[in-house]
Image (cartoon, grey):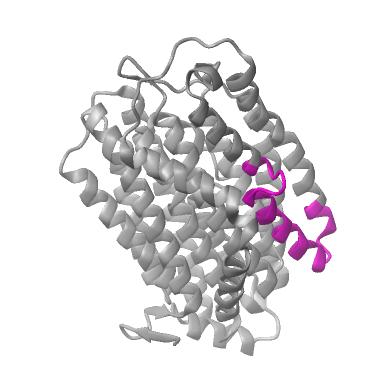
Protein backbone atom coordinates (compact mmCIF):
# COMPACT_ATOMS: atom_id res chain seq x y z
CA UNK A 1 0.00 0.00 0.00
CA UNK A 2 1.25 3.55 -0.73
CA UNK A 3 2.69 5.15 2.38
CA UNK A 4 5.32 7.67 3.50
CA UNK A 5 7.64 8.01 6.47
CA UNK A 6 10.10 10.42 8.15
CA UNK A 7 7.69 13.34 7.90
CA UNK A 8 6.92 12.57 4.28
CA UNK A 9 10.55 12.59 3.08
CA UNK A 10 10.43 9.01 1.80
CA UNK A 11 7.56 7.16 0.14
CA UNK A 12 6.68 3.60 -0.84
CA UNK A 13 4.31 2.34 -3.52
CA UNK A 14 4.23 -0.44 -6.10
CA UNK A 15 6.44 1.43 -8.58
CA UNK A 16 9.05 2.25 -5.92
CA UNK A 17 9.02 -1.36 -4.67
CA UNK A 18 9.48 -2.80 -8.16
CA UNK A 19 12.36 -0.47 -9.04
CA UNK A 20 14.09 -1.15 -5.71
CA UNK A 21 13.92 -4.89 -6.43
CA UNK A 22 15.43 -4.21 -9.86
CA UNK A 23 18.26 -2.19 -8.28
CA UNK A 24 18.95 -4.87 -5.67
CA UNK A 25 18.90 -7.58 -8.36
CA UNK A 26 21.41 -5.53 -10.34
CA UNK A 27 23.61 -5.10 -7.25
CA UNK A 28 23.59 -8.87 -6.68
CA UNK A 29 24.68 -9.40 -10.31
CA UNK A 30 27.37 -6.68 -10.01
CA UNK A 31 28.67 -8.26 -6.81
CA UNK A 32 28.82 -11.71 -8.41
CA UNK A 33 30.71 -10.30 -11.40
CA UNK A 34 33.17 -8.44 -9.16
CA UNK A 35 34.24 -11.41 -6.99
CA UNK A 36 36.61 -13.17 -9.47
CA UNK A 37 37.78 -9.87 -11.00
CA UNK A 38 38.67 -8.34 -7.63
CA UNK A 39 40.74 -11.42 -6.78
CA UNK A 40 42.54 -11.42 -10.13
CA UNK A 41 43.30 -7.69 -10.10
CA UNK A 42 44.12 -7.63 -6.36
CA UNK A 43 41.52 -4.94 -5.54
CA UNK A 44 39.45 -7.14 -3.23
CA UNK A 45 39.98 -4.80 -0.30
CA UNK A 46 37.64 -4.28 2.64
CA UNK A 47 36.25 -0.99 1.32
CA UNK A 48 35.09 -2.43 -2.03
CA UNK A 49 31.92 -4.19 -0.75
CA UNK A 50 31.31 -1.44 1.81
CA UNK A 51 31.27 1.21 -0.93
CA UNK A 52 28.94 -0.98 -3.01
CA UNK A 53 26.56 -1.24 -0.05
CA UNK A 54 26.56 2.54 0.46
CA UNK A 55 25.96 3.06 -3.27
CA UNK A 56 23.04 0.61 -3.13
CA UNK A 57 21.64 2.41 -0.09
CA UNK A 58 21.87 5.74 -1.91
CA UNK A 59 20.09 4.30 -4.96
CA UNK A 60 17.20 2.84 -2.95
CA UNK A 61 16.86 6.15 -1.09
CA UNK A 62 16.81 7.98 -4.44
CA UNK A 63 13.91 5.86 -5.65
CA UNK A 64 11.97 6.45 -2.40
CA UNK A 65 12.78 10.17 -2.10
CA UNK A 66 9.64 12.25 -1.62
CA UNK A 67 11.41 15.56 -1.07
CA UNK A 68 14.00 17.51 -3.06
CA UNK A 69 16.36 17.48 -0.06
CA UNK A 70 16.02 13.72 0.43
CA UNK A 71 16.61 13.37 -3.31
CA UNK A 72 19.86 15.34 -3.10
CA UNK A 73 21.21 13.53 -0.03
CA UNK A 74 20.49 10.13 -1.61
CA UNK A 75 22.06 11.17 -4.91
CA UNK A 76 25.25 12.32 -3.20
CA UNK A 77 25.50 9.15 -1.09
CA UNK A 78 25.38 7.10 -4.29
CA UNK A 79 27.71 9.42 -6.21
CA UNK A 80 30.45 9.72 -3.58
CA UNK A 81 30.62 5.93 -3.27
CA UNK A 82 30.91 5.55 -7.05
CA UNK A 83 33.64 8.23 -7.29
CA UNK A 84 35.84 6.21 -4.95
CA UNK A 85 35.03 2.89 -6.65
CA UNK A 86 36.10 4.38 -10.00
CA UNK A 87 39.57 5.22 -8.65
CA UNK A 88 39.95 1.96 -6.70
CA UNK A 89 42.89 0.70 -8.80
CA UNK A 90 45.35 3.14 -7.24
CA UNK A 91 48.28 1.63 -9.18
CA UNK A 92 46.50 2.35 -12.48
CA UNK A 93 46.74 5.93 -13.76
CA UNK A 94 43.68 5.45 -16.03
CA UNK A 95 41.58 4.52 -13.01
CA UNK A 96 42.76 7.56 -11.04
CA UNK A 97 42.17 9.83 -14.04
CA UNK A 98 38.65 8.42 -14.54
CA UNK A 99 37.84 8.95 -10.85
CA UNK A 100 39.03 12.56 -10.98
CA UNK A 101 37.06 13.32 -14.17
CA UNK A 102 33.93 11.74 -12.74
CA UNK A 103 34.32 13.65 -9.48
CA UNK A 104 34.84 17.07 -11.09
CA UNK A 105 31.97 16.71 -13.56
CA UNK A 106 29.77 15.13 -10.88
CA UNK A 107 30.39 18.11 -8.59
CA UNK A 108 29.32 20.43 -11.42
CA UNK A 109 26.12 18.40 -11.96
CA UNK A 110 25.40 18.46 -8.21
CA UNK A 111 25.79 22.23 -8.23
CA UNK A 112 23.29 22.52 -11.08
CA UNK A 113 20.88 20.25 -9.21
CA UNK A 114 21.18 22.29 -6.01
CA UNK A 115 20.68 25.54 -7.89
CA UNK A 116 17.53 24.12 -9.45
CA UNK A 117 16.25 22.98 -6.04
CA UNK A 118 16.83 26.44 -4.57
CA UNK A 119 14.88 28.08 -7.42
CA UNK A 120 11.97 25.66 -7.07
CA UNK A 121 11.92 26.23 -3.29
CA UNK A 122 12.06 29.98 -3.81
CA UNK A 123 9.03 30.03 -6.11
CA UNK A 124 6.91 27.36 -4.38
CA UNK A 125 7.95 27.69 -0.71
CA UNK A 126 8.26 23.91 -0.39
CA UNK A 127 10.75 21.11 -1.03
CA UNK A 128 8.21 18.29 -0.50
CA UNK A 129 6.79 16.69 -3.63
CA UNK A 130 3.20 17.06 -2.35
CA UNK A 131 3.72 20.71 -1.44
CA UNK A 132 5.21 21.54 -4.84
CA UNK A 133 2.37 19.68 -6.59
CA UNK A 134 -0.26 21.65 -4.68
CA UNK A 135 1.34 25.02 -5.48
CA UNK A 136 1.83 24.24 -9.19
CA UNK A 137 -1.71 22.96 -9.66
CA UNK A 138 -3.07 26.10 -8.01
CA UNK A 139 -1.24 28.50 -10.36
CA UNK A 140 -2.56 29.12 -13.88
CA UNK A 141 0.73 30.21 -15.48
CA UNK A 142 4.04 28.85 -14.11
CA UNK A 143 6.73 31.44 -13.41
CA UNK A 144 9.77 31.47 -15.73
CA UNK A 145 12.07 31.17 -12.69
CA UNK A 146 10.27 28.00 -11.60
CA UNK A 147 10.65 26.46 -15.06
CA UNK A 148 14.34 27.41 -15.01
CA UNK A 149 14.70 25.62 -11.65
CA UNK A 150 13.03 22.51 -13.07
CA UNK A 151 15.38 22.54 -16.07
CA UNK A 152 18.44 22.71 -13.78
CA UNK A 153 17.09 19.76 -11.78
CA UNK A 154 16.58 17.81 -15.01
CA UNK A 155 20.14 18.65 -16.06
CA UNK A 156 21.50 17.29 -12.77
CA UNK A 157 19.57 14.02 -13.16
CA UNK A 158 20.43 13.79 -16.89
CA UNK A 159 24.12 13.72 -15.87
CA UNK A 160 23.47 10.64 -13.73
CA UNK A 161 21.85 8.75 -16.61
CA UNK A 162 24.53 10.03 -19.06
CA UNK A 163 22.03 11.61 -21.42
CA UNK A 164 23.47 13.81 -24.19
CA UNK A 165 24.79 16.52 -23.74
CA UNK A 166 25.59 15.52 -20.13
CA UNK A 167 27.35 12.31 -21.19
CA UNK A 168 30.95 13.64 -21.34
CA UNK A 169 32.16 11.57 -18.40
CA UNK A 170 30.75 8.25 -19.57
CA UNK A 171 33.28 6.89 -22.14
CA UNK A 172 36.37 7.87 -20.11
CA UNK A 173 34.96 6.57 -16.82
CA UNK A 174 33.77 3.29 -18.38
CA UNK A 175 37.21 2.75 -19.93
CA UNK A 176 39.31 3.82 -16.94
CA UNK A 177 37.36 2.26 -14.06
CA UNK A 178 37.99 -1.37 -13.04
CA UNK A 179 35.85 -3.52 -15.36
CA UNK A 180 33.72 -4.88 -12.51
CA UNK A 181 32.96 -1.27 -11.46
CA UNK A 182 32.14 -0.42 -15.09
CA UNK A 183 29.63 -3.28 -15.05
CA UNK A 184 28.05 -1.74 -11.94
CA UNK A 185 27.89 1.69 -13.65
CA UNK A 186 26.28 0.22 -16.75
CA UNK A 187 23.61 -1.72 -14.88
CA UNK A 188 22.36 -0.17 -11.68
CA UNK A 189 22.76 3.62 -11.12
CA UNK A 190 20.92 4.40 -14.35
CA UNK A 191 17.87 2.45 -13.18
CA UNK A 192 17.79 4.43 -9.92
CA UNK A 193 18.24 7.78 -11.69
CA UNK A 194 15.54 6.99 -14.28
CA UNK A 195 13.16 5.99 -11.48
CA UNK A 196 13.88 9.30 -9.76
CA UNK A 197 13.31 11.19 -13.03
CA UNK A 198 9.95 9.46 -13.53
CA UNK A 199 8.82 10.29 -10.01
CA UNK A 200 9.89 13.95 -10.30
CA UNK A 201 8.31 14.54 -13.72
CA UNK A 202 5.07 12.66 -13.14
CA UNK A 203 4.80 13.85 -9.53
CA UNK A 204 5.55 17.44 -8.47
CA UNK A 205 6.16 18.65 -12.06
CA UNK A 206 3.23 16.83 -13.68
CA UNK A 207 1.40 20.12 -14.32
CA UNK A 208 4.48 21.41 -16.20
CA UNK A 209 4.34 18.57 -18.74
CA UNK A 210 4.26 20.85 -21.84
CA UNK A 211 7.51 22.45 -20.60
CA UNK A 212 9.46 19.35 -19.57
CA UNK A 213 8.36 17.30 -22.58
CA UNK A 214 10.39 19.64 -24.80
CA UNK A 215 13.51 19.10 -22.67
CA UNK A 216 13.13 15.31 -22.50
CA UNK A 217 12.35 15.13 -26.25
CA UNK A 218 15.68 16.85 -27.03
CA UNK A 219 17.62 14.69 -24.55
CA UNK A 220 16.09 11.50 -26.01
CA UNK A 221 16.72 12.42 -29.66
CA UNK A 222 20.29 13.56 -28.97
CA UNK A 223 21.11 10.48 -26.86
CA UNK A 224 19.91 7.83 -29.32
CA UNK A 225 21.60 9.65 -32.21
CA UNK A 226 24.97 10.28 -30.54
CA UNK A 227 25.01 6.83 -28.91
CA UNK A 228 24.57 5.24 -32.35
CA UNK A 229 27.01 7.32 -34.40
CA UNK A 230 29.80 7.80 -31.81
CA UNK A 231 29.88 4.07 -31.11
CA UNK A 232 30.84 3.31 -34.72
CA UNK A 233 34.44 4.47 -34.25
CA UNK A 234 35.16 2.64 -30.99
CA UNK A 235 37.79 -0.10 -30.73
CA UNK A 236 37.70 -0.52 -26.94
CA UNK A 237 34.72 -2.66 -25.96
CA UNK A 238 34.20 -0.80 -22.66
CA UNK A 239 33.98 2.54 -24.50
CA UNK A 240 31.62 0.90 -26.98
CA UNK A 241 29.38 -0.19 -24.10
CA UNK A 242 29.48 3.39 -22.79
CA UNK A 243 28.02 4.71 -26.05
CA UNK A 244 25.61 1.79 -26.13
CA UNK A 245 24.36 2.78 -22.66
CA UNK A 246 23.95 6.41 -23.78
CA UNK A 247 21.77 5.20 -26.64
CA UNK A 248 19.80 2.88 -24.37
CA UNK A 249 19.06 5.73 -21.97
CA UNK A 250 17.78 7.68 -24.97
CA UNK A 251 15.26 4.92 -25.71
CA UNK A 252 14.12 4.96 -22.08
CA UNK A 253 13.65 8.74 -22.31
CA UNK A 254 11.39 8.22 -25.34
CA UNK A 255 9.05 6.30 -23.04
CA UNK A 256 9.25 8.99 -20.34
CA UNK A 257 8.47 11.85 -22.76
CA UNK A 258 5.01 10.38 -23.43
CA UNK A 259 3.92 11.21 -19.88
CA UNK A 260 1.50 8.26 -19.88
CA UNK A 261 1.14 5.06 -17.88
CA UNK A 262 1.84 3.06 -21.06
CA UNK A 263 5.09 4.95 -21.61
CA UNK A 264 6.28 4.42 -18.03
CA UNK A 265 5.31 0.73 -18.23
CA UNK A 266 7.42 0.44 -21.41
CA UNK A 267 10.37 2.08 -19.61
CA UNK A 268 10.11 -0.38 -16.70
CA UNK A 269 10.04 -3.37 -19.08
CA UNK A 270 12.88 -1.91 -21.16
CA UNK A 271 15.12 -1.31 -18.14
CA UNK A 272 14.52 -4.82 -16.80
CA UNK A 273 15.57 -6.31 -20.15
CA UNK A 274 18.49 -3.86 -20.39
CA UNK A 275 19.73 -4.94 -16.94
CA UNK A 276 19.68 -8.62 -17.93
CA UNK A 277 21.45 -8.03 -21.26
CA UNK A 278 24.13 -5.76 -19.78
CA UNK A 279 24.93 -8.20 -16.96
CA UNK A 280 25.58 -10.96 -19.49
CA UNK A 281 27.70 -8.79 -21.79
CA UNK A 282 29.93 -7.63 -18.94
CA UNK A 283 30.13 -11.19 -17.67
CA UNK A 284 31.73 -12.13 -21.00
CA UNK A 285 33.92 -8.99 -21.09
CA UNK A 286 35.29 -9.97 -17.66
CA UNK A 287 36.34 -13.36 -19.09
CA UNK A 288 38.54 -11.66 -21.74
CA UNK A 289 41.92 -12.60 -20.27
CA UNK A 290 45.08 -14.11 -21.73
CA UNK A 291 47.89 -15.28 -19.47
CA UNK A 292 46.27 -13.43 -16.59
CA UNK A 293 46.10 -10.08 -18.42
CA UNK A 294 42.71 -8.38 -18.83
CA UNK A 295 41.84 -7.49 -22.45
CA UNK A 296 39.53 -4.71 -23.60
CA UNK A 297 39.77 -4.36 -27.39
CA UNK A 298 37.11 -5.68 -29.75
CA UNK A 299 39.80 -7.31 -31.91
CA UNK A 300 40.77 -9.48 -28.93
CA UNK A 301 37.50 -11.38 -29.53
CA UNK A 302 38.78 -12.55 -32.94
CA UNK A 303 37.92 -16.19 -33.65
CA UNK A 304 36.22 -16.71 -30.29
CA UNK A 305 33.71 -19.06 -31.96
CA UNK A 306 36.54 -21.54 -32.56
CA UNK A 307 38.40 -21.19 -29.27
CA UNK A 308 35.33 -20.88 -27.00
CA UNK A 309 32.06 -21.57 -28.87
CA UNK A 310 29.78 -21.22 -25.84
CA UNK A 311 31.13 -17.77 -25.00
CA UNK A 312 30.87 -16.68 -28.64
CA UNK A 313 27.26 -17.83 -29.04
CA UNK A 314 26.29 -16.26 -25.71
CA UNK A 315 27.81 -12.93 -26.78
CA UNK A 316 26.14 -13.23 -30.19
CA UNK A 317 22.68 -13.71 -28.69
CA UNK A 318 23.20 -10.76 -26.34
CA UNK A 319 24.44 -8.51 -29.16
CA UNK A 320 21.47 -9.48 -31.36
CA UNK A 321 19.13 -8.72 -28.47
CA UNK A 322 20.72 -5.30 -27.94
CA UNK A 323 20.30 -4.66 -31.67
CA UNK A 324 16.58 -5.40 -31.31
CA UNK A 325 16.35 -8.53 -33.47
CA UNK A 326 13.15 -10.56 -32.90
CA UNK A 327 12.28 -12.82 -31.15
CA UNK A 328 14.91 -11.90 -28.54
CA UNK A 329 13.99 -9.87 -25.44
CA UNK A 330 15.63 -6.65 -26.64
CA UNK A 331 13.20 -6.47 -29.57
CA UNK A 332 10.21 -6.35 -27.23
CA UNK A 333 11.83 -3.69 -25.05
CA UNK A 334 12.17 -1.33 -28.03
CA UNK A 335 8.78 -2.34 -29.45
CA UNK A 336 6.91 -1.26 -26.29
CA UNK A 337 8.84 2.03 -26.20
CA UNK A 338 8.02 2.88 -29.83
CA UNK A 339 4.38 1.82 -29.42
CA UNK A 340 3.96 4.21 -26.49
CA UNK A 341 5.61 7.05 -28.45
CA UNK A 342 3.45 6.52 -31.55
CA UNK A 343 0.28 6.33 -29.42
CA UNK A 344 1.01 9.89 -28.18
CA UNK A 345 1.87 11.18 -31.68
CA UNK A 346 5.62 11.44 -31.05
CA UNK A 347 6.13 10.10 -34.57
CA UNK A 348 9.33 12.02 -35.34
CA UNK A 349 10.98 10.85 -32.11
CA UNK A 350 9.96 7.24 -32.81
CA UNK A 351 11.42 7.45 -36.36
CA UNK A 352 14.69 8.90 -34.97
CA UNK A 353 14.80 6.01 -32.49
CA UNK A 354 14.26 3.38 -35.19
CA UNK A 355 16.90 4.92 -37.49
CA UNK A 356 19.38 5.12 -34.58
CA UNK A 357 18.74 1.41 -33.90
CA UNK A 358 19.66 0.62 -37.51
CA UNK A 359 22.93 2.61 -37.22
CA UNK A 360 23.82 1.06 -33.85
CA UNK A 361 23.24 -2.41 -35.31
CA UNK A 362 26.55 -1.96 -37.17
CA UNK A 363 28.72 -2.03 -34.07
CA UNK A 364 26.76 -4.83 -32.40
CA UNK A 365 26.97 -6.98 -35.54
CA UNK A 366 30.65 -6.05 -35.95
CA UNK A 367 31.40 -7.85 -32.67
CA UNK A 368 29.62 -10.96 -34.00
CA UNK A 369 31.61 -10.71 -37.25
CA UNK A 370 34.91 -10.50 -35.33
CA UNK A 371 34.02 -13.55 -33.21
CA UNK A 372 32.81 -15.76 -36.07
CA UNK A 373 34.73 -14.63 -39.18
CA UNK A 374 38.14 -13.37 -38.06
CA UNK A 375 41.11 -15.65 -37.48
CA UNK A 376 41.66 -16.54 -33.82
CA UNK A 377 44.63 -15.07 -31.98
CA UNK A 378 44.80 -17.46 -29.03
CA UNK A 379 42.33 -18.84 -26.54
CA UNK A 380 41.21 -16.94 -23.46
CA UNK A 381 42.15 -18.24 -20.03
CA UNK A 382 39.94 -21.07 -18.76
CA UNK A 383 37.97 -22.21 -16.90
CA UNK A 384 35.41 -19.51 -16.12
CA UNK A 385 34.70 -18.63 -12.51
CA UNK A 386 31.36 -19.96 -11.26
CA UNK A 387 29.80 -16.50 -10.60
CA UNK A 388 30.57 -15.43 -14.18
CA UNK A 389 29.12 -18.62 -15.63
CA UNK A 390 25.95 -18.21 -13.57
CA UNK A 391 25.39 -14.58 -14.63
CA UNK A 392 26.07 -15.29 -18.32
CA UNK A 393 23.76 -18.34 -18.28
CA UNK A 394 20.89 -16.49 -16.58
CA UNK A 395 21.29 -13.50 -18.88
CA UNK A 396 21.26 -15.55 -22.09
CA UNK A 397 18.37 -17.70 -20.84
CA UNK A 398 16.33 -14.56 -20.08
CA UNK A 399 17.04 -13.07 -23.52
CA UNK A 400 16.15 -16.29 -25.37
CA UNK A 401 13.16 -17.44 -23.29
CA UNK A 402 11.46 -14.08 -22.65
CA UNK A 403 9.14 -14.60 -25.64
CA UNK A 404 7.72 -17.77 -24.06
CA UNK A 405 6.23 -15.90 -21.10
CA UNK A 406 6.39 -12.11 -21.43
CA UNK A 407 3.08 -11.59 -19.61
CA UNK A 408 4.58 -11.69 -16.11
CA UNK A 409 6.96 -8.79 -16.69
CA UNK A 410 4.44 -6.85 -18.81
CA UNK A 411 1.72 -7.09 -16.13
CA UNK A 412 4.18 -6.22 -13.34
CA UNK A 413 5.36 -3.21 -15.36
CA UNK A 414 1.81 -2.00 -15.94
CA UNK A 415 0.90 -2.33 -12.27
CA UNK A 416 4.06 -0.47 -11.22
CA UNK A 417 3.44 2.29 -13.79
CA UNK A 418 -0.16 2.70 -12.61
CA UNK A 419 1.15 3.43 -9.10
CA UNK A 420 3.07 6.46 -10.44
CA UNK A 421 -0.16 8.12 -11.51
CA UNK A 422 -2.33 6.85 -8.64
CA UNK A 423 -1.76 9.99 -6.56
Whether residue 94 sits left or right of residue 331 in the image: it is left
Q: Main secondary structure of the magenta part?
A: helix
Give percent across and percent down for residue 389.
39, 39
Residue drawn at x 42%, y 41% as measured from the top left: 183
Frontmost residue, 46 versus 85: 46
In the foreground, 215 or 284? 284
Query: On screen, 79 above or below 86?
Result: below
- Image coordinates of residue 190 in percent, x first then y, are 49, 53
Residue 343 belongs to magenta span: yes
Q: Residue at x 45, y 37 (%)?
A: 282
In the image, the segment drawn in magenta is 321-350
- Vertical comparison of 1 with 255: above or below: below
Q: Nearer the viewer, residue 390 or 110?
A: 390
350 versus 129 height, above or below: above
Which of these two is toward me, 9 or 280? 280
Q: Quadrant location of the C terminus?
A: bottom right
Q: Name the residue located 70 percent from the left edge and 59 percent from the top edge.
A: 337
Q: Position of residue 98 (x, y in %)?
A: 38, 32
Q: How many numbered marks does the figure carry?
A: 0
**Residue at the image point whose x is 64% and y is 32% from the top:** 364
Is residue 136 at all visible to an observer of this figure? yes
User: Magenta span has 70?
Assistant: no
Question: With 91 as the anchor, is 245 left or right in this view?
Answer: right
Where residue 400 sits in the image (x, y, percent)? 60, 48
Amino acid sequence: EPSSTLNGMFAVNEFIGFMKLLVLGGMIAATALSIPYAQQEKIGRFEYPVLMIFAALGMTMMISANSLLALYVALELQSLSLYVLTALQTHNTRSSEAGLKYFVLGALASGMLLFGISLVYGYTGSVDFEGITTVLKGSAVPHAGLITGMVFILAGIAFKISAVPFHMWTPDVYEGAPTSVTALFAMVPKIAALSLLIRVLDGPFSSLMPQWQQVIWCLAAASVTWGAFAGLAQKNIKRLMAYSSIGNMGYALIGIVTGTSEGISAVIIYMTIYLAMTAGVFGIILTMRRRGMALENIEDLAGLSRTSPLRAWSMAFLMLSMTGIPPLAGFFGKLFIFQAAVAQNFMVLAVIGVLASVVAAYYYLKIIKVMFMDEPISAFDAPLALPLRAIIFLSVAFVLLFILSPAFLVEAGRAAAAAVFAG
